[in-house]
Image (spheres, rainbow, N blue to C red):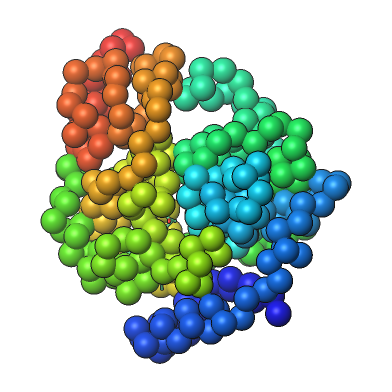
Amino acid sequence: MKLDKQHGGIVLAALLGGAAGIGIIALALSMARPDAEAIAAVPEQPSADYGRRLLRDTAELMGPGHENPELRYTGSHLDCSSCHLDTGTKPGTLSLMQSASRYPRFSGRDGGEGDMRDRINGCMTRSMNGRELPRDSVQMVSMELYINSLQAQYSAMSESRRTAVEPAAFVEPDRAADLQAGQRVYEERCVVCHGVEGLGLQATLDLNDGYVFPPLWGPDSFNNGAGMNRVLTASLFIKARMPLGQPDLTDDQAFDVAAYINSKERPQMANLEQDYPDRTTKPVDSPYPPYADDFPVEQHRFGPFRPIREFYASQKK
Ligand code: HEC
Ligand code: HEC
């Protein structure tokens, strides 16, 4: 039997059952192992359906423990859907439903125009801490086909379903983030799923099967070059989506807990100084140097951001 990682259902059961519920679910998942070979087989022809599976079961299909070393593309056991919820079909924050129409486009980070495949490789090397997929590989083309197919799905959606049930967008507090307050939010609202050490909860005893609750920091998390490592990007996501199933944090709480998570150790990406060839286009919350200003790295990581924005605005005059 193939047991999907049906996150919503699992999360609900876990919330109802408390910590014991999570343990039982983890056990149930570990006993229901699917036929690994059938799942791991790569189809000869790319398809949107395989692309959807790649976004959902990324760790199993191209994770660092894949039995075929050539297919070990990602460096962590996250799935794309750890961030792009419901394989990108959930409208709102980090939805992929309208992505096809956004590419090719200019990327300040890369200093040039990039297409969908370049963007996917951006998440492969940063969010997934892995390596680039060959542009014409079955994996790459399948994911692109899948994301393109979401556009039609979006067009067919009713207006009410498009304007998703999401809290009001995150509004940045005009202050530096408070890491201690962030730790308190973490302990009260996040520990139950993401764990005391931020290492998440594995789907089975075998890490290669991925996570039910993904890690937020540590060696198996997104790397420091990832968008989620920017405190404003993370705050936006957390306010809209977390705690999963009950996203009710205030702007202050989302900001502080995002900073707390991103103050922790995570994999480091090489050559980040080459990002943003025009450094004046670097986002204020880009957490790694160099910058075209003299504000300390700490301020770029945790704010306050208003003085930085004012500096760049005055440069333009
Ligand atoms: C750790 C979280 C995380 C994971 C895991 C992740 N992404 Fe992303 N992804 C992001 C963030 C953050 C952005 C940037 C959104 C923005 O530009 O505001 C993004 C952007 C994208 C975009 C561009 C969306 C658009 O409309 O411009 C695509 C396509 C994408 N990701 C695909 C993937 C794929 C495929 C995977 C798995 C191989 C993946 N992502 C894994 C966080 C993640
Ligand atoms: C009820 C369980 C639950 C709670 C509580 C929860 N999360 Fe999550 N979180 C998840 C799941 C599950 C995912 C992956 C998305 C999916 O699989 O649908 C996730 C994904 C994430 C991600 C992106 C993926 C990654 O690994 O980085 C971040 C960041 C995150 N959560 C932060 C938080 C923060 C901060 C809190 C507390 C305010 C929190 N979460 C509370 C279940 C939870």
For the question of whether residue 160 can be seen, the reply is yes
Decide if residue 42 is on the left or right side of residue 198.
right
Relative image position of residue 168 (x, y in whole percent): 41, 57
The furthest residue to the right: 45
For the question of whether residue 103 can be seen, the reply is no
The furthest residue to the left: 180
Relative image position of residue 200 (x, y in whole percent): 38, 65
Decide if residue 186 is on the left or right side of residue 72.
left
Residue located 55% across and 53% down the image = 65
- Which quadrant is the N terminus positioned in? bottom right
In this view, 186 is above or below 96: below
Relative image position of residue 198 (x, y in whole percent): 31, 61
The front one of 257 and 207 is 207
In this view, 111 is above or below 248: above
Image quadrant in which you'd find residue 24: bottom left
The front one of 208 and 95 is 208
